[in-house]
Image (tube, rainbow, N blue to C red):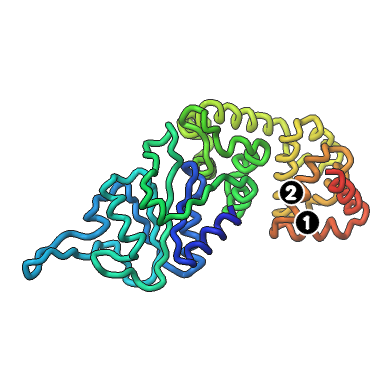
Amino acid sequence: MRKEKQLVKELMLLGEVPLLVGEAGIGKTTMIYDIAVELGLPLVDLPVQLMNPEDLLGLPLIKDGKTEFTLPAWFPSRPSVIFLDEINRASSRIRGALLKLLYEKTVAGVRLPQGTLLAAAMNPPTDDYAVDELDDAALLSRLVPVELGVNVADWLAYMEAKSGNNLVIGFIKAYPEWLLGGANDPLPRPNPRTWEKISHILNGLSDEVKEEFLTSLLNKMVGVKAQAAFTKFVEGLKSFDPKAVFDKGARDSLLALKPNLQLVAMSRALDMALEDPTLDFVGALSYFVDKAPKEVIVSLYRTITETDRYASIKAGIAESPKLSLALSRLISKI
């Protein structure tokens, strides 16, 4: 969602209020947080679905026979990013209170600090979410809707950068359709947030606890279908040790795997070569370049060339004219 993020950021800097519309767990809040960090501004996250009008506008106070409003606790003391989350779950009273904030940029008669930016988000109005159709013309006229989807490549890069679990990353690489469940699939269904949570759990649980409870946890987090697909994937990987990629006497066993599993096994071998420079990944790739399915080799090569941490492997490939030529020919056929 890099392009969408840039769009949202530029809209905010123009003084507009982008409305991020997308499924739960795809990274709407993370996007706004990242934008705030990039701009050096604190984030004020307002869960408007849980708020009353006085939480948003401040409590009334009688002063000199007149009603005034005190500033709410969230009111920023300096330029900030204000994020109105789940705006279509807010009550009609809150939506009315939002109008002055969105239009006048004021709260209790006090203007927001100069340079304060606003954004909002909502889940789509489907049967899966306890939300209303946002049909308030006055409110909508103050927002700029931005539809967000899921970019598998961006999510994988994000997970690899934060050392996500290799099995989760490998599964989504092999079966990207499982990153986000279909709109008609029963709940629970997978989304990027739940896979990130599963990655964290897999990295932290002991083998004994995983053996006992992992299947049950997955069923409750991503649903039976995704759990079954992930379990089958993991079982398939157990039949091949990635170290065999470097063993001239055993590496042909890789070719017996399905292409998706070949790619994951080669990716794991690639990471092993980063940790142990004595493992000759360039030599292994030279062996498989005309034996493994071309989509496996091309996908692997693109990962190497597009990921900074594989710079040493990329340099090794460049030093092998025969391998470089073979890879160029494969890419030209895609």
Residue 220 lies left or right of residue 94; in this view the side is right
Mark number for residue 118?
none
The quadrant the C terminus occupies is: top right
Mark 2: amino acid: Leu
Residue under the image location 31 percent in, 50 percent down: 95
Q: In this rendering, does residue 215 appear at all?
A: no
Q: Which mark is residue 313?
A: 1
Front-most of residues 292 and 21:
21
What residue is pinned by disc 2? 270
Q: Earlier in the sequence, mark 1 or mark 2?
A: 2
Q: Position of residue 106 (x, y in %)?
A: 30, 66
- Distance of label 1 from label 2 (alpha carbons): 9 Å
Q: What secondary structure is found at the residue carrying circle 2?
A: helix
Identify the amino acid type marked 1: Ile
Which structural element holds mark 1?
helix
The residue positioned 55% from the left and 32% from the top of the image is 182
Which class describes the residues within 10 Å of circle 1: few (<14), some (14-19), or many (20+)? many
Which is nearer the eye, 281 or 93?
Answer: 93
> Is 104 on the left-hand or right-hand side of 180?
left
The residue lying at 78 percent from left, 39 percent from top is 244
Residue at x 66% of width, y 41% of height:
173
Label 2 near label 1: C-beta < 8 Å?
A: yes
The x and y percentages for residue 117 are: 42, 65
Measured as percent of width and height from the top left, residue 308 is found at 70, 60
Toward the left, the furthest residue is: 65
Question: Is residue 44 in view from this perspective?
Answer: yes
